[in-house]
Structure formats: structure tokens, C-alpha cells
Amino acid sequence: MNLDSDRNNDHRRFYELLDDLECRLGGARKLSNCSGRDGWPQRGIYFFREAGEQRIDTGKGPRIVRIGTHALKAGSRTKLWTRLSQHKGVVKSGAGNHRGSIFRLIVGAALIERDGLDYPTWGKGSSAPRDTRDGEVALEKAVSAEIGEMPFLWLDIDDDPGPDSFRGYIERNAIALLSNCAKEALDPPSTCWLGNFSSRQRVRESGLWNSNHVTENYDTDFLQTFKTKVNNMSKSP
């Protein structure tokens, strides 16, 4: 069996496990319909999909476009919903803070490129004065609308924060597996995928809203760890 065949099979295994996870969760969710009162686990991994993005090589169904986790630094107290809410944005205003979410930042930058928008302050600095943020509200709302409609799954893994956590291990290997950077393209993005307008080469070439780990090789053994963690999830009634 050649390496490309191995990766194709591992793709299929990965998505089979996601199907199992979705059944256990009782279906995917959208951030536009979520709140902090929905009983989220303390820590976990999330897997986003996107309308119009389908698998075409390794089976049928939606492909994953973004994988993420949180609390990978020792001592971090960030919870899963805290991270998801940063991507979601602010309910009251419909806006958000792209300086606190790399996901929001790169989606907004792609919208700027695709739609020919003028936001010279977007992504500048780790903070910004009120007048700058006020000038970015319309784009922040557009980003919230875009991300808010992306269906996602999550996997409960409540291990200790740190770079060697199971969450970090599964995240980086799942990204490396699905990334098309310098590899045969499997389940590539559609021609109209918003990420094709990203200024980040790694986003465009990987087919993911991720930059870290997209050029790395993956450890196929992570799929067994992933399976074990999915099996630990209780099934939805």
C-alpha cells in the first residue's frame, strides 16, 4: 500500500469517527444558536464544517474546515465555551473581537479580499482604541454571521492544560492529516470556498482555516486515541 493510499484510508477512518461522534452528540450545532448555558464540557476539541464544502475523494458528507482546542499552556484556565464564544462574537451587538480570535481574523481578512472591502486596521495590533473598533463593527458582524452558521462538533477531553495533552495531540495530528499542503489533494475545497481568498498561503493550500501544523506529518496512531476518546462520550438520548 502506498503512502497516498494510507492517507486516503486514514481520512476515511477519521470521518467515520466523526460520524460516530455526531451520533453521540445528537447532531452538530451552530454557534449562532449556542450559549454558555448549554452544558459544555470544561475542555475539549472542536471541528467546524462550512456550507458548500463537501468531501469528494474519501466518501460523502461535509468536510472539516477548522480544528481547534484551547488551554495548551500549563496553568491555563480557559474553558471550551470561552474559546468558542471568542469565535462566536458578542450576542448583544452581533459584532466581536478578531484580535482575540485568530479564526475571526483570518475569516475577516478573506472577506476583505473577496468583497474588496477597505479595513486598513484589520488585524493591526493586539488591541485597538474605541474609535478603531467602532470602524470595524460592520466587518465584525459579517464575520460573526459567517462563523455562526458553520456547523461544528466537539469532543470532551478534560485533561490537564499543557502542550502534551491529548487535546493537543489529537488537534495537531488531525490538522496534519486533513491538510493538503505539499501533499496529494484529498477532499479539496470548492472553487468558491471563502478560504481561497485568504492572504495566508497555508490556509489556501491546506484547505483549512488553520495555519499551525498544516505542513507537518501526522502520526497514524492518533486515530486510535481519537477513537478511544469518542467512545468515552456518552450517547445522546
Image: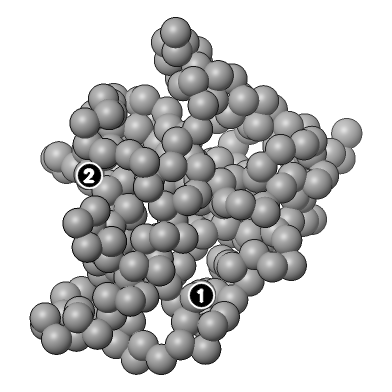
Label of residue 147 in the image:
none
Q: Is residue 85 visible?
A: yes
Color theme of the render: one colour
Q: Secondary structure at mark 2?
A: helix
Q: Residue at x 42, y 72 (%)?
A: 108
* Total numbered labels placed on residues in the image: 2
Left or right position of 77 against 88: left
Q: Farthest right residue?
A: 1
Q: Furthest-front residue in view?
A: 92
Does 171 sit left or right of 64 as displayed?
left
Residue 151 is situated, as x and y percent measured from the top left of the image, at 51, 42
Question: Which amino acid, mark 1?
Answer: Ala
Rendered-image quadrant of the C terminus: top left
Can residue 180 be seen by looking at this rendering? no
**Disc 1 marks which residue?**
110
Residue at figure coordinates x 28%, y 80% from the top left: 136
Q: Residue at x 50, y 33 (%)?
A: 28
Q: Name the residue rendered at 15%, 40% in the picture.
A: 77
Residue 192: which quarter of the image?
bottom right
- Give whichever of 8, 132 is nearer the camera: 132
Q: Quadrant of residue 133?
A: bottom left
Query: In whole angstroms, how far apart are the C-alphas of marks 1 and 2?
Result: 24 Å
Could you tell which of marks 1 and 2 lies nearer the N-terminus? 2
Kind of residue at badge 2: Thr
> Is 143 on the left or on the right of 213, as rendered?
left
Element under label 1? helix
Q: Quadrant of the N terminus?
A: top right
Q: Residue 90: horizontal and vertical position, in percent?
A: 23, 57
Q: Is residue 230 above or below residue 84?
A: above
Quarter-wise, where is residue 137 in the image?
A: bottom left
Mark 2 sits on what residue?
82
Image: 119 above or below 52 = below
